[in-house]
Image (cartoon, helix red, strand yellow):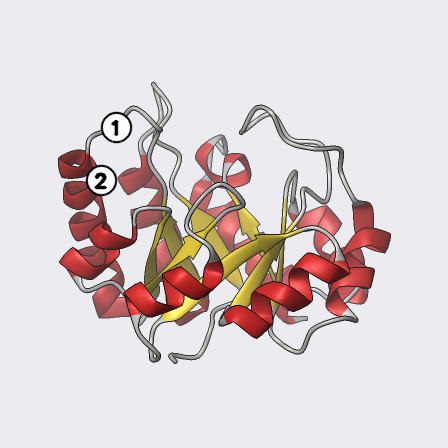
Amino acid sequence: MPSLGRLHLITDTRPGRDPLAVLRAALPVARAELVVQVRVEDDASDREAYELAGQVLGLCRPYGATCLVNDRLHVALAVDAAGGHVGAEDLPVAAARRVLGAGAVLGATAREPGSAAAAVAAGASYLGVGPCHATTTKSGLPDPIGPAGLRAVAGAVEVPVIAIGGVTAASVPALRAAGAYGVAVVGALSGSPDPARTTAELIAALTC
């Protein structure tokens, strides 16, 4: 499995957002510390997901950044991404591992120690844990678990834990202290007036 970057950028494909412009700003700053999770809206076609993932992969490659595809593992295979990420409503982790193969990066979503340990036992390479703080990026999410909830999950597993949900550069130190290996962001970058500067602030907080 490739070494895992600490800053995960999840593509924001909501109307009015430009995920490729954000990525072009972030890549020269974060370089190999960036992991891009290609996520599209539920009503997007597989063709749209495939085309976006191919563009993201092409942008990532010169910088050594990792490209994953969320949910749609067949798209990850089709573009030869490094792997994928599955949520609670997607394929079970064990099935996703069989689809992607032993050498792929496979992320799974968890929010409590029991499900986290089960996901790792089933083949997850890393865990996306949260929401850690309130967020408006995605609807229907459970209540935030905070740094204490993150700490409980991180203490139960030995794979990298990526904190997600309302993450900003200011919140990174507390999340790192709670055991986060890295963080995943959507709105913090897609809504920033200066994504390159915000990326630099996040990377500084993650690596200090």
Image position of 102 (left or right of 89)? left
Residue positioned 38% across, 41% down in the render: 11
Residue type, label 2: Ala
Q: Position of residue 54 (x, y in %)?
A: 16, 51
Mark 1 and mark 2 residues within 8 Å of each other at the beta carbon: yes
Q: Position of residue 196 (x, y in %)?
A: 44, 48
The Cα atoms of the two marked residues, 1 and 2, are separated by 7 Å
Q: Quadrant of residue 178?
A: bottom right
Q: Position of residue 139 (x, y in %)?
A: 57, 24
Regarding residue 125, the answer to whether it shows in the image is no
Q: Badge 2, how many Cα within 10 Å: few under 14, some, many 20+?
A: many
Residue type, label 1: Ala
57 above or below 102? above
Nearer-N-terminus badge (1/2) = 1
* Element type where label 2 sits in the image: helix
Residue positioned 55% across, 38% down in the render: 188
Residue positioned 21% across, 51% down in the render: 75
Q: Quadrant of residue 45?
A: top left
Q: Nearer the viewer, residue 67 or 7?
A: 67
Q: Which residue is mark 2?
A: 49
Q: Could you tell me which quadrant the C terminus lies in?
A: bottom right
Q: Position of residue 170 (x, y in %)?
A: 73, 48
50 above or below 191? below
163 above or below 103? above
Q: Which residue is mark 1?
A: 44
Residue positioned 38% across, 68% down in the render: 97
Q: What numbered label is drawn on residue 119?
A: none
* Element type where label 1 sits in the image: loop
Regarding residue 89, the answer to whether it shows in the image is yes
